[in-house]
Image: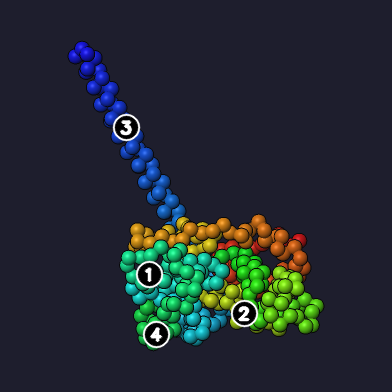
Amino acid sequence: MSPAAMLSLCRKHLFGLVGSMFLIMLCFYQWNTSDEKRAESIYQKQEVRKQRLRDICERDKAAFPEEKQGWEDLSDSELRHLLVDDNHGIIFCFIPKVACSNWKRVMHVLNKGEPYQDPISIPQELVHDTFPHLISFPRAEMKAKMKHYTKFFFVRDPFVRLISAYRDKFGTENEYFYHHFGRDIIRLYGNNPNPPKTAAEAFSSGLHTSFYNFIQYLVDPRTNKTWFEPHWRQMHRLCHPCAIQYDFLGHQESLQDDAQQLLTLLKLEDAIKFPSSYENMTAHNSVHDWFRTVPLEDRRELYNIYQEDFKLFGYRTPEELLNS
């Protein structure tokens, strides 16, 4: 090969190498910029959520009379949903049917210490009731933890959460919920004065609590709405966001992004991974189908019961269910 040809070949290789490096740097810059924009968008969304809470809590104090003096005036029973991880300075208020089990898996792993397990490997029987509750500490310790720990909770569209609770507790053979709620619901609203005594008998005979019967129970003036069972109790009555100044508010609808942001806030993003969410079987586009059997008057009364959750957490009022 002539010297000139050799020089030409070397130039091509050099320019090719430089070009490749430039493209790599450009892609990295674009990826990094995109990642930063995404993080900034998530941060801004978080600030909007917290500001909405502050504004509504301040404006509608009459709607939250039990919380206007702050969390110190709440009873132990009102604070029983707050779990503590002293190792990482975390307080988590859990809400049933809002990624509750997976966050408890994460808390379980964190409490066990390093090396952290994969949270999804924690079996269901170890998920619940394995953590210190805030109310298990003296009030002076509670006060210190509430002041210094990172406090967070997650919420969900109130009607979608109700449907999920119904499917889980009444759509399957659940002896506890049938005995404590389902049998009476069938007796009072299902035109059956003597329902089977067990869930097994009820399901084998094709009898179960219908979704409409469940809604009838919720809107019945005789039902104590303040102390609903936690799976359908109003979310603000479980976590009291007008009395407790939370550092982070996540949404089920953006669970993976919010979980990643929270783990980053806790400096745990490289240590633990939040379990991937399964396909949501209670999707927004199915809500109208679920409420098809529920009369308009009952839909409106149900919204009145949960309207504070809709407002506080920024969920759209379901006009299509309330006006037609």
The secondary element bearing badge 4 is classed as loop
The secondary element bearing badge 3 is classed as helix
Q: Which residue is drawn at 22% across and 13% down?
A: 1
> Do the residues under discs 1 and 3 have CB atoms within 8 angstroms?
no
Please state which of residues 16 and 131 is positioned toward the viewer in this rendering: 131
Q: Name the residue under label 1.
A: 110
Residue 150 vertical placement versus 75 (above, below): above
Q: Mark 2 points at which residue?
A: 176
Tell me residue 269's x, y (percent).
37, 59
Left or right, residue 71 beside residue 289: left
State whether residue 205 appears in this view. yes
| Cα–Cα gap, marks 1 and 3 | 43 Å
Left or right, residue 115 beside residue 309: left
Tell me residue 251's x, y (percent).
52, 63
Amino acid carrying label 1: it is: Leu
| Cα–Cα gap, marks 2 and 3 | 64 Å
| Cα–Cα gap, marks 2 and 4 | 30 Å
> Dot 2: within a 10 Å radius of its alpha carbon, few (fewer than 14), some, or many (20 or more) residues?
few
Question: In terms of sequence position, does the residue under pointer 1 or pointer 2 come before the other?
Answer: 1
Q: Residue at x 44, y 77 (%)?
A: 130
